[in-house]
Amino acid sequence: MYRPTIHFVGDSISMHYDPYLARFLQPWADYSRKGARLGTLEPPAEANGGDSTLVLAYLRQMQGAGIAPDYIAINCGLHDLKTDPASGKKQVELGLYERNLRAISAYVRALPSRMIWLRTTPVVDDLHNRPGLAFHRHAEDVAAYNRVADAIMAQEGIPTIDLHTFTATLGREAFCDHVHYREEVRAQQAAYIAGALQRLLGSTPEETPFVPPRITACVGAVVLRGERVLLVRQAEGALRGQWSLPWGFVEGRAPDGSPEPPDLAALRETQEEAGVTAQVEGLLGIQNHGSAAGELRVYFLYLCRHVAGEPAPDQRETDRAAYFSLAELDGLREPVEELTAWLARRVLRGQYRLLAPLPANPYAPHLAFG
């Protein structure tokens, strides 16, 4: 019998409904949550998912361990919007929250798993913000953070379970303290989530909705500085310890607010991973890479020229960055990722054809090649 694997990452609200949800899902799904051993990943010290920055760090650990459940159900928000009553400063400001959610979506795709989002539950200001409490939460912030999350999930095509609206209908009597819920409400929340998951996923292959193969746009940058090519050493994931081109997912926004085109993504990844500002000269090629999980990654590989900056790793995704000549690349004793080694050598030897930007570009400011 088909049994999807579903992993939950959430705050104390989800920890409270967890025992009920595990019981409701047991007949048709394999359920786990942050706090338990997951494959080769040791149980984390803290079962609470915390704010969006901590959720992102946990997903990086999952990626490094090569763990990819079928679905990852995520909520974060209540910790992000914690407010210092004296300064008004948020634990995670709204702009960083938005960037974190986009990165979370990208990391789930990269595992690869499918993401399900749960909207942040309500707060009632006069119940929550009691005198002497170290931090406050406000209903208007819950609404603002939920709006940001709603927009991202809609853009990314990520299904959402509206736990906020369901819980809000139960009224202020549902609370047992400033933010948590009575025992019977926790059971109701779990039943609502289990029903939503079964509608989304089905419990047999015949009931599971058809999901088209996921196609993920990725980029790589071959950045030249004279006769030397820029490489970075990966600090996490399956390529940890290997030198590679600056690479990543198309996941950001262009300066005009439109979805990020691949050429700008290549420049962004170069700046983020290596601290170098570059300029795109043309498209070297496109590589398709399929996975056993049914995801197709399409890599746009760009030739770029150094403009400014000295190589400096971000000390998160990369721990070294440097330019290499062909002789230095051939003599490098550390491992070099396979595609990087092949493509960098071809470019340094001049063995490539370049699809250059159109001189009269009707699609400005984004590049069109021909």
Image (cartoon, rainbow, N blue to C red):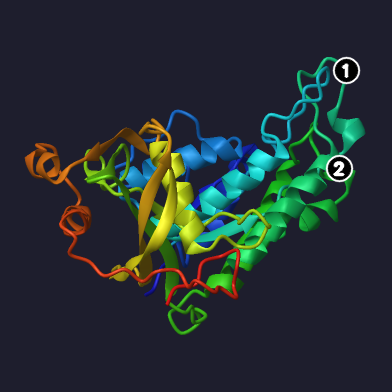
Determine the residue located farthest toward the right in the rendered image.
Answer: 126
- From the viewer's perspective, is 131 left or right of 103? right
Q: Which residue is mark 1?
A: 131
* SS for dot 2: helix
Quarter of the image for residue 320 reads top left
Quarter of the image for residue 159 reads bottom right
From the top left corner, tell me how far across and down residue 143 is, in percent: 81, 48
Which is nearer the N-term, disc 1 or disc 2? Answer: 1
At horizontal 52% and vertical 75% (from top left) the residue drawn is: 202
**Placement of 79 over or under 242, stated as above or below:** above
* SS for dot 1: loop
**Marks 1 and 2 in Cβ contact (< 8 Å):** no
From the top left corner, tell me how far across and down residue 272 is, in percent: 45, 41
From the top left corner, tell me how far across and down residue 240 is, in percent: 26, 41
Quarter of the image for residue 346 reads bottom left
* Amino acid type at mark 1: Pro
* Quadrant of the rendering where the C terminus is positioned: bottom left
The answer to whether any part of residue 221 appears in the image is yes
* Amino acid type at mark 2: Glu
